[in-house]
Amino acid sequence: MVDYRDAAQATALVDLLDAYASDPAGGGTPLDADVRKSLPAALAARPQAFSVLAYDGGQPVGLVNCIEGFSTFACKPLVNVHDVVVLPSHRGQRVAQKMFAQVEQEARRRGACKLTLEVLSGNAPALRAYEREGFMGYQLDPAFGSAVFLQKKL
């Protein structure tokens, strides 16, 4: 797990998240300077947040940011996988798979009933990776269709 107060880990987290934000799949816009500066401390202040870094030869190459939520139907915690980043140079090498193993271990330690995530429908490589890890579309009753993720910016 990332120690958000460790300067090297905080820098790795911000740099990897910035790489993701700058990528077309992440919106194509780098993180704002204030976000880069404030994010590690903001995450450290939230006990429900945790992150995993992946390294290759001492260099950070992957990141998963998670936020614990709560399932009212199960009356148990759930863990939302909020960001998944693997540098282009390391995609296809199962980096995400290794990070997801750590995420799942932490989620089980917290007593979570499930992991959730969102993925853009056009990001086929990521969708395949998530399906390999056991993620699938969500529906309660086929008559009502699959869940759709919506947002309203404030």
Image (spheres, rainbow, N blue to C red):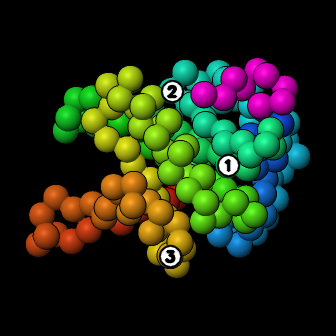
Q: Earlier in the sequence, mark 2 or mark 1?
A: 2
Task: Find numbered disc 3 in the image and state the secondary structure of the residue it sits on.
Answer: helix
Mark 2–mark 1 Cα distance, whole angstroms, equals 21 Å
Q: Amino acid at mark 1?
A: Gly
Q: Nearer the viewer, residue 130 or 112?
A: 130
Q: Are marks 1 and 3 in contact (CB under 8 Å)?
A: no
Mark 1–mark 3 Cα distance, whole angstroms, equals 18 Å
Above or below, comparing residue 87 to residue 111 in the picture:
below
Q: Nearer the viewer, residue 47 or 127?
A: 127
Asked if residue 15 lies left or right of residue 112, the reply is: right
Q: Amino acid at mark 3?
A: Ala
Q: Residue at x 20, y 35 (%)?
A: 74
Q: Is residue 36 visible?
A: yes
Task: Find numbered disc 2 in the image and state the secondary structure of the residue it sits on.
Answer: loop
Number of numbered markers: 3
Range of residues picked out in magenta: 1-9
Mark number, residue 48 = 2
Residue at image mark 1: 62
Q: Residues within 10 Å of mark 2 (few under 14, many from 20)?
A: some
Between circles 2 and 1, the one closer to the viewer is 1
Provide residue 23's location: percent of width, then percent of height.
Answer: 74, 67
Q: Residue at x 16, y 58 (%)?
A: 140
Residue at image mark 3: 124
